[in-house]
Amino acid sequence: LEKEQILREACEKKQFILHFQPQISMHTGRVTSVEALVRWQHSEKAIVYPGEFISHIEKLGLIVDFGNWVLQTVCEQIAQWRASGLPYLQVAVNISPLHFQDASLPGTVRDLLMKTNIPAQYLELEVTESAMQTKGHVEIFNQLRQLGVKIAIDDFGTGYSCLASLKKLPLDCIKIDKTFIDDVLTSSHTALLVGAIISLANALNYKLVAEGVETRDQALAMRELGCQIIQGYFFCHPVPSDQISALLDVDF
Ligand code: G
Ligand code: G
Ligand code: MN
Ligand code: NA
């Protein structure tokens, strides 16, 4: 109960901050986009990671308000980077399956895009395969795509019906789960699977991002298999927004 009170207060007092993790193009060695990752800035020293609090926010019924705050903060950040002279930068935002069931999501996104005046293609929503099972998701999907917002399937390969989720709806991006990258060097079976997923993404004309690449050898193996975009600690950890500008100048 105490934890609930603390979380409720954190929501009210806006103790959340966003960090951004670059996604690197294997063709150019440059940052193509970033993923927004929330952190709870508890006190001056303590940072709490979302694995510890997102599910509580969901249980407290606060996830729509919370997710809308994340979306608003991201849209404002995209506008701010642009206003400071940088090119538009695409930002991927994690959306809870519960938020994805909320019929007001497309309208909220439309209003935010209008208010911040950013082109819709710079906002990418990451949903997991479980969001593809929620009630009313088809309508919400279609409305979001009509706005021009991009949709990525997160943690691809870990859900129980990833091919079904591809069959159902047109997407823009597949994010191969870290568990595949973890084994790609040690299991030829996994390497074959990863190659097949990459072929699938290419055939469907979807962007493909490899997540959780931690070593040079993993990055080289993924590039060898045809992966175009890599995200992971090997290239860059999630960082505060004021570090992004310098990273846009780096040749990775
Ligand atoms: O940053 P970290 O590895 O601790 O993130 C853990 C999990 O929290 C990931 O599964 C990620 O998708 C999720 N997460 C991070 N930021 C957000 C957010 O803004 N909203 C939601 N709903 N989930 C997030
Ligand atoms: O579920 P989702 O894909 O949104 O989770 C992304 C999470 O993975 C982020 O919270 C991020 O901090 C974490 N992450 C990103 N790169 C790496 C990595 O190379 N290794 C590990 N262990 N985690 C990573
Ligand atoms: Mn994600
Ligand atoms: Na993921």
Image: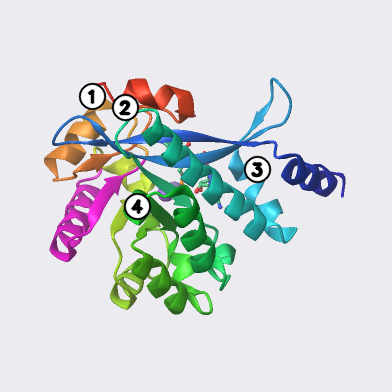
Disc 2 marks which residue?
Answer: 235
Disc 4 marks which residue?
Answer: 119
As for residue 198 lying within the magenta part, the answer is yes
Disc 1 marks which residue?
Answer: 252
Mark 4–mark 2 Cα distance, whole angstroms, equals 27 Å
Q: Secondary structure at mark 2?
A: loop
Furthest toward the right, the residue is 2
Q: Is residue 85 above or below residue 208?
A: above
Q: Secondary structure at mark 1?
A: loop
- Residue 240 seen in render: no
- The magenta-colored residue range is 187-211
Disc 3 marks which residue?
Answer: 52
Q: Amino acid at mark 4?
A: Pro
Mark 1–mark 3 Cα distance, whole angstroms, equals 32 Å
> Quick one: label 2 or label 3, which is nearer the N terminus?
3
Q: Is residue 115 above or below residue 25?
A: below
Q: Position of residue 182 (x, y in %)?
A: 34, 40
Q: Secondary structure at mark 4?
A: loop
> Quick one: label 1 or label 2, which is nearer the N terminus?
2
Q: Amino acid at mark 2?
A: Phe
Q: Quadrant of the C terminus?
A: top left
